[in-house]
Image (cartoon, rainbow, N blue to C red):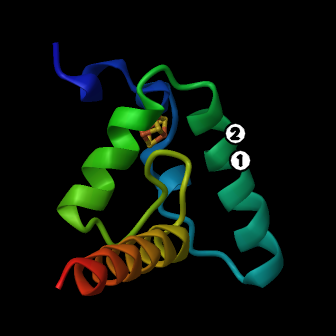
Amino acid sequence: MDWRESGACLQEDPDLFFPTGATASLSREIEIAKSVCRRCSVQQACLEWALGAGQLSGIWGGTTEDERRAWSRRRQESVGVRERRTA
Ligand code: SF4
């Protein structure tokens, strides 16, 4: 069975995972979506998919777009450091 079929978000309004409010309500919407992800049995698989696919918008695997972008940047930097060490 595909991990998508087990996501806790299947029981929620999909718009919850694509928050668009103003700053104060945006933070609240993001936290609500993340709380669903925290109780999701496939959170890790979802996050790995989002990172691998370069999913830019929405909450995936309990992370925001900015958090995934920062994580990818750190990963690329760490790979670069390793490559320079072995060169
Ligand atoms: S981690 Fe979040 S976005 Fe991913 S499947 Fe689970 S509830 Fe849905």
Q: Quadrant of ligand 1?
A: top left
> Picture coordinates of residue 79 (x, y %)?
30, 74
Residue type at tag 1: Ile
Q: Which residue is mark 1?
A: 32
Q: Is mark 1 within 8 Å of ligand 1?
A: no
The structure residue drawn at horizontal position 31% and vertical position 75%, both measured from the top left corner, is: 82
Q: Which residue is situated farthest in the front direction here?
A: 86
Where disc 2 sits, the SS reads helix
> What quarter of the picture does the C terminus occupy?
bottom left
Residue type at tag 2: Ser
In-image side of 14 versus 64 (left or right): left
Q: Which residue is situated farthest in the right direction here?
A: 24
The part of the image, by quadrant, that contains residue 51 is bottom left
Q: Which residue is mark 2?
A: 35
> Picture coordinates of residue 61 (x, y %)?
46, 45
The part of the image, by quadrant, that contains residue 42 is top left
Q: Is residue 41 above or below residue 27?
A: above
Q: 45 or 72, which is in the foreground? A: 72
Residues tagged 2 and 1 counted as in contact (Cβ below 8 A): yes
Q: Is residue 85 above or below residue 40?
A: below
The Cα atoms of the two marked residues, 2 and 1, are separated by 5 Å
Where disc 1 sits, the SS reads helix
Q: Which residue is situated farthest in the top direction here?
A: 1
